[in-house]
Amino acid sequence: MTDQSTATPSQDDVLAEIRSQLATMKVPGGESATLEMQWADLDVDSLELVELVKALEDKYGIQIADEELKPIKGVGDAVALTQRLVGGQGAA
């Protein structure tokens, strides 16, 4: 057991995880995704987004509700949401 699940991951850590998952899903340019990129820029479809969300939930021990997912338009939004949810676990 590690404290990784309770410590808020850095922006770079979450971005690296997203890049890794996008590369695993064979998303063109996924391994070099930036915080400014939108899902449309990466040609990420809804199924791939669901896979990415599941991977982030598993990696960080969080639950991303559908209503929280709707405003997530790109990589930077996903990073910020992940950090917020992980950071909120310690306060609960």
Image (cartoon, rainbow, N blue to C red):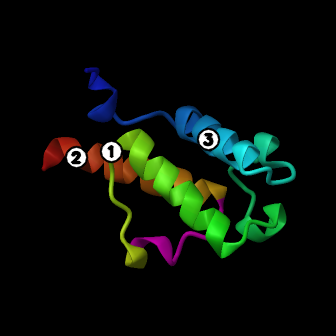
**In the rendering, at what x and y percent does residue 35 appear?**
68, 50
SS at badge 2:
helix
**In the rendering, at what x and y percent does residue 56 appear?**
48, 49
Q: CA distance from mark 3 to mark 2?
A: 20 Å
In contact (CB < 8 Å): disc 1 and disc 2: yes
Which of the numbered marks, if any, corresponds to residue 61? 1
Tally the marks. 3
Badge 1 local density, few (<14 within 10 Å), some, or many (20+)?
Answer: some
**Residue flagged by tag 2: what amino acid is it?**
Gln
Which of the numbered marks, if any, corresponds to residue 89? 2
Relative horizontal placement of residue 2, taking residue 80 as reference (left or right): left
Upstream in sequence: badge 1 or badge 2: 1
**Membership of 69 in magenta stretch:** yes
Q: Quadrant of residue 37?
A: bottom right
**Membership of 21 in magenta stretch:** no
Depth check, mark 1 against mark 2: the one in front is 1
Q: CA distance from mark 1 to mark 3?
A: 16 Å
What residue sits 73% from the left and 65% below the top?
38
**Residue flagged by tag 1: what amino acid is it?**
Gly
**In the rendering, at what x and y percent does residue 30 appear?**
78, 48
Residue closer to the observer: 84 or 40: 40
Helix, strand or loop for the magenta stretch, by majority: loop
Depth check, mark 1 against mark 3: the one in front is 1
**In the rendering, at what x and y percent does residue 7 appear?**
31, 31
Q: Quadrant of residue 67?
A: bottom left
Badge 3 local density, few (<14 within 10 Å), some, or many (20+)?
Answer: many
| Residue where numbered disc 3 is placed | 15
Write the start and end of the magenta stretch as one range: 68-74
Residue closer to the observer: 42 or 23: 23
